[in-house]
Amino acid sequence: MSNRLTGRVALVTGAARGIGAALAQRLAQEGAAVAAVDLSAADETVEAIEASGGKAASYLTDITEKASVDALAETITSELGSVDILVNNAGIYPVVSFEDLTAADWRKVFAVNVDAMFYTAHAFLPAMKTNGWGRVVNVASNSVALQVPGQTHYIASKLAVVGLTRGIATEYGQFGITANAIAPSAVHTPGTSDMPEEGFQALAQAQSIKRSSVPQDLAGTLAFLASEDASFITGQTLYVDGGLVRAL
Ligand SMILES: NC(=O)c1ccc[n+]([C@@H]2O[C@H](COP(=O)([O-])OP(=O)(O)OC[C@H]3O[C@@H](n4cnc5c(N)ncnc54)[C@H](O)[C@@H]3O)[C@@H](O)[C@H]2O)c1
């Protein structure tokens, strides 16, 4: 592991478990101090990071509350320093057919998957702009390019994530800030624990790389995008899915 993020402060939402926990651990291994933000205490993530010599702290926040996100920005900045790397990972993916979808279902998915990313970006981009350096990495999904029933609200929200990412890239590139999205396939996490194994296997067979995805598959891509090596990549959506989706 390199130390290419030494001296950086990173924030990962949804860091208590699943993909977010793996992303937080990898950023810490690369040298960043990590703010692990979640609805539940991210104690296991923080303990794992500290056990391997890294620096992290857990912050309990509902990121769908704008005032809470603004307060979080003040707290993290005073405790860890200004955030250089913002990783918007927290998301929900309930399965509901379009016919049964309610306005409340729709709003909830957009609140977590889209509104929260807008709140965090608004709260943390000003300091990145002042510092003349920053990285925003948003977690999308390869389902935006697939036919997945029961996910109309989810797919619409993740396409909004792609749009948000592109808008930030457009307006902040001049300040040394990049914004990119990473799009996983189905990944084994606590959130997908009720997805049948046959579903994972069917996807694996459709991919070029014929195995199911684990959270660590996303970690290397994130570390690269967060690093200096990726300073000329912005506004992109990278499919990290074993070659299932081929984007031009
Ligand atoms: N697992 C997959 O198959 C898969 C595939 C494609 C994309 N994704 C995306 O990856 C991301 C992470 O997925 P996962 O499978 O690790 O999920 P997960 O359910 O295992 O973990 C998500 C974490 O986000 C936290 N969270 C949810 N709402 C929150 C809120 N309002 N405020 C703060 N924290 C909140 C949860 O407490 C949880 O710890 C999501 O954006 C998801 O859409 C996942």
Image: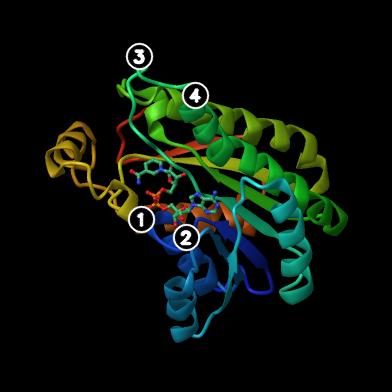
**First-in-chain label (4 vs 3):** 3
Pick whichever of labels 1 and 4 is earlier in the sequence.
4
Relative vertical location of residue 165 with respect to residue 34 in this rendering, above or below: above
In the structure shown, which secondary structural element does the residue marked by tag 4 occupy?
helix
For marks 3 and 1, give the one nearer the viewer.
Answer: 3
From the image, tell me which residue sits under label 4.
156
- CA gap between label 2 and label 4 equals 24 Å
Q: Which residue is mark 2?
A: 23
Residue at 21% x, 35% y is 203
Judge depth for marks 2 and 3 and give the one in front.
3
The residue lying furthest to the left in this view is 198
The reply to whether the C-beta atoms of the residues labelled 1 and 2 are less than 8 Å apart is yes
At 28% from the left edge and 49% from the top edge, which residue is drawn?
A: 213
214 or 198: which is nearer to us? 198
Q: Which residue is mark 3?
A: 99
- Look at discs 4 and 3 and give the one toward the viewer: 3
Q: Is residue 160 above or below residue 73?
A: above
Q: Earlier in the sequence, mark 1 or mark 2?
A: 2
**Cα distance, mark 1 to mark 2?**
8 Å
User: In this orientation, which residue lies closer to the viewer: 73 or 248?
Assistant: 73
Marks 3/1: CA distance? 32 Å
| Residue 235 point in image, percent of width and height | 63, 35
Q: Could you tell me residue 23's position as x and y percent?
A: 47, 60
Give the distance between the C-alpha atoms of the residues marked 2 and 3, in whole angstroms.
35 Å
